[in-house]
Amino acid sequence: MAGRPLIAFAAAICTLLGFAAFQNARSDVEGWREIAWPFSRDGWPTGRAFKCAAALCGDEIELYLRPKAGFCNCDTGVADDEEVDRVTDIDLITERFAPHEPGNAVRVAGMAGRLRTYDLAMPDGARRAAVGIAVSRRCDLFVAVAQGHGNGSHVRHVALDFLGSTGMEKWMIASMDGAPH
Amino acid sequence: MGRVKLAILAAFSVACANGAAAQQQVIGAPPEASNMKLVGTNDLQARSAYQPTIHHQGDRWIAYIGHHGGTDDIPTPVNPMTGKAEPNGTSIVDVTDPAQPKYLRHIPGQEGKYEAGGAQMVRICDGKALPKGDRNAVYMLRTFGSEAHEIWNVADPANPVLITRLAGLKDTHKNWWECETGIAFLVSGAPDWRTRRMSQVYDLSDPAHPVKIRDFGLPGQEPGSTGAVPTELHGPISTGPEGNRVYFGYGTNKGGFLQIVDRDKLINGPKEPTPENLRLPEISRMPMSAFNGAHTTFPMKGMPIAEFAKDKDGKNRDIVMIVDEAILNECAEPRQMVWFADVTVENRPMMISSYTVPEASGSFCERGGRFGSHSSNESMAPVYYKKMAFIAFFNAGVRALDIRDPYHPTEVGHFIPSITAATDKRCVTIDGKDRCKVAIQTNNVETDERGYIYIVDRANTGLHILELAGPARTVAGLP
């Protein structure tokens, strides 16, 4: 039993070291700033949320991203567009969304998956455009959703540009390894 | 640097690198048991096992055991009876003498590793019980990986014959088959539906000539719908035409709910998968926390509750036991456990109690593999029904619960098998590298009418046949 306090101490140090690594992996893309996770707690740990002002991104765009451990078919990965509908967090923005067009294969942070653009019907009657992205590594998913006022292809371009930055790629990989977020 | 500092540094390094090794299982150590004892074992050819179904077949007792796909290390284990490498499928074992189980046959399943292959699920009906079955046949309904359901004649369990195949699916899972009517609630992934798993209702009263009745799921899952897609089905349990209810469990380890469905409306109602037609048979839904799923929804209607015996009303309660499935290794998710819902007032079901294995009782988060519940026995044979439930709890083995008062379920026994050289490792990723441990992963459990308890291991350790001992036998009324 004497080992338990030492183990707890070691675990705490490990956690702090992990958190320090996470801090160093913050976004390095101009124009984006981190905002509070805007959604209620659900089955997965909360993720990270970012906003880019219209002056810098051509449209005010928000992006939400997080890992979902154990939520993927270990062998087939993200197999089809319906899976993108199911697993991305687009339903957290609104449950009323419709795909704009068939999705595409995508690769983010070295992980393969699919993305799809959507038209959103917001509760206040406004219309928005969004892109849902789901990529996987083994049995785990990483999902991202971006929304904006403009057209879906622009939102997709801006979101992929941000996700492809060095800092975000590092963080995505670290978060799939269980780093805190 | 002083000795004390060096010692602390060394301990710190070990803790960071390996985590605590407390109570980790080692080969050769005895099983851990309380009020349950081992009767017999079979290694099931070291195949990862999921659903056992025990059938009284003539004067024999036969265990049919579904398997997951192979592993990265051994994708297609060799069947010693044929000398050939065979994708994991279905094991058929004669357990007439539970102390000496005799392996009869392995039927290969779909190629593929882990959940991508194998033949996880199995149900059995006698031909003489089915309205249009061959009276001399015994039918085995099994999944074939993700792509099909199959029915075999296993009247001679050592020489099964394929009868029917329902193919072209994108997934399958835990079916329910009513032997007295032949109605089957197949968990399938119809290609045009927006979910991996929904229900296809079939009339399998004549297994050689399946008749599809309808597709069923939740509004939002049907073809052509848009917007949020509800949680996928895990499995149903029907109470047959007499009970006229089907209890569907949705979700596995997240956002689950129990759906209570009018069986007659489901089978005979309008079949076109419109949102209105999908809502019609539903009596109620009971959502669970986003942290938990509904893997198994096991109904126990009309349970007398001793505490309520003198109450003028409500002394008998309809109970559904809901079992979640843990899916992540080493406690990387909220605890998956067992819940009891009082569904006496069907449109207002309410969770009344819960059960979990105390983690500290075995340092289970540190042992390796999954810790948490997965499944329960589904036999409704009188020996245990409404008295005891057996829960597969991964690295905590099987747990025997006294459920006579479902408002206060109590553990009365447990059994954690020993690991063997066949037991497969379970890994977590730390700093981008795998760190692996070996532990029992009790994956599922079933009972037979004699009172034997059959547990199977996901990590390839095989089948263990158990019996109750001591005070646990008293709970079941066993001598």
Image (cartoon, coloured by chain):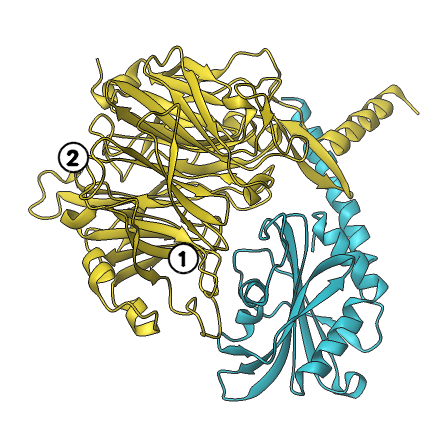
Chain colours: A cyan, B yellow
Foreground label between 1 and 2: 1
Q: Is residue B272 above or below residue B199?
A: below
Locate residue B421, reporting x and y percent.
62, 18
Three-letter code for the amino acid on which mark 1 is drawn = Met
Q: Left of B268 or right of it: where is B153?
A: right
Give the residue at mark 1: B198
Residue corresponding to mark 2: B306
Q: Is residue B232 above or below residue B66?
A: below
Residue A86, position as x, y percentages in the image: 53, 64
B316 with respect to A125 (left or right): left
Q: Nearer the viewer, residue B305 or B204?
A: B204
Query: Chain for mark 2?
Result: B
Q: Is residue B402 visible?
A: yes
Chain of the residue displaying label 1: B
Q: Secondary structure at mark 1?
A: strand
- Taking the view exactly as shown, the residue that stands out farthest to the right is B1
Q: Determine whether, in the image, residue B379 is placed left or right of residue B306.
A: right
- Tell me the kind of residue under disc 2: Ala
Q: Residue B194 at x, y = what percent?
A: 48, 65
Looking at the figure, which quarter contains the C terminus of chain A? bottom right
Say whether disc 1 or disc 2 marks the residue closer to the N-terminus: 1
- Residue at 47%, 17% in the rendered image: B42
How busy is the neighbourhood of tag 2: few (under 14 within 10 Å), some, or many (20 plus)?
few
